Amino acid sequence: MEQLQRLCARLDGINASVGRVAAWLSIPIIVIVVLDVVTRRFFTLGSVTLQELEWHLHAVLFLFCAAYAYIDDAHVRVDIFRARLGRRHRAWIELLGAVFFLTPYSIVMVVLGSQFVTDSYLLNEVSDAPGGLPYRFVIKSALPIGFLLLATQGVSTAVKQVLILKHHGGKAGVDVR
C-alpha cells in the first residue's frame, strides 16, 4: 500500500516538475507573438520562422502541461453530475475514466506518435513554408513525450482511486487531489 502511494507521489512529482518548467514557455510565447505582431503591423516584415516558433512552443506548452493540470484537477470536465456525487462515486468515475479512456488513449498516442517522429526523422522533414523551421521531428517528438506524461498521470490517478475505494473514501490518509 505504501509502495503504491510512493509510486503515485513519484509520478505526480515528475509530471508536476515537467509542467512547472513547461509553463515558463508562456513567457517566450508572449514575446514572440508581440514581436511578430509589431513587425508585421508597423514594419510590414513577416516571419514564417516566428509564426512556426509560436505554434511549436504552444504545442510543447500544452502537451507538457496536460498531465500537470490533471494532477490538480484543473482539466476540463463536465461537473454537472459529478459535483453532486459522493467521494466514493467520484472515485469510481475517475477510476473508470483513467483505466478505460485516458491511459489507453495516451498509450495509443505514444505508439503512433513515436512512429510519426521516426518517419519525420528518417525523411529529414522540414517545414513546407519558405523560411520555415528545419528538423520537424524535434517538435513532433513533443507528442509522444506529452502523452507519455499523461499516461503516467492516468496510472497514478487510477491507483489513487483504487486506494480511496479500498479505504472507504480515503479514511486511511490517502492523498488524492
Image (cartoon, helix red, strand yellow):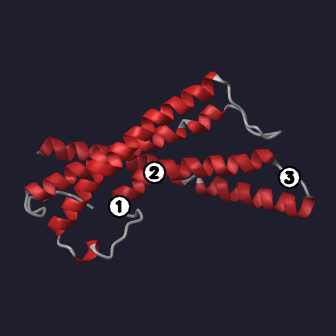
Question: Which of these two is toward me, 79 or 19?
Answer: 79
Q: Residues within 10 Å of mark 1 (few under 14, many from 20)?
A: few
Q: Is residue 60 left or right of residue 123?
A: left
Q: Helix, strand, or loop for circle 2?
A: helix
Q: Is residue 156 left or right of residue 122?
A: left
> What whole-number distance in Å separates the C-alpha atoms at marks 3 and 1?
39 Å
The answer to whether one can see residue 2 in this image is: yes
In the rendered structure, which amino acid carries the disc numbered 2? Gly
Q: Helix, strand, or loop for circle 1?
A: loop
Q: Which residue is mark 2?
A: 19
x 20%, y 58%: residue: 175
Q: Earlier in the sequence, mark 3 or mark 2?
A: 2
Q: Position of residue 77 (x, y in %)?
A: 38, 66
Q: Which mark is residue 72?
A: 1
Residue extending farthest top: 122
Q: Residues within 10 Å of mark 3 (few under 14, many from 20)?
A: some
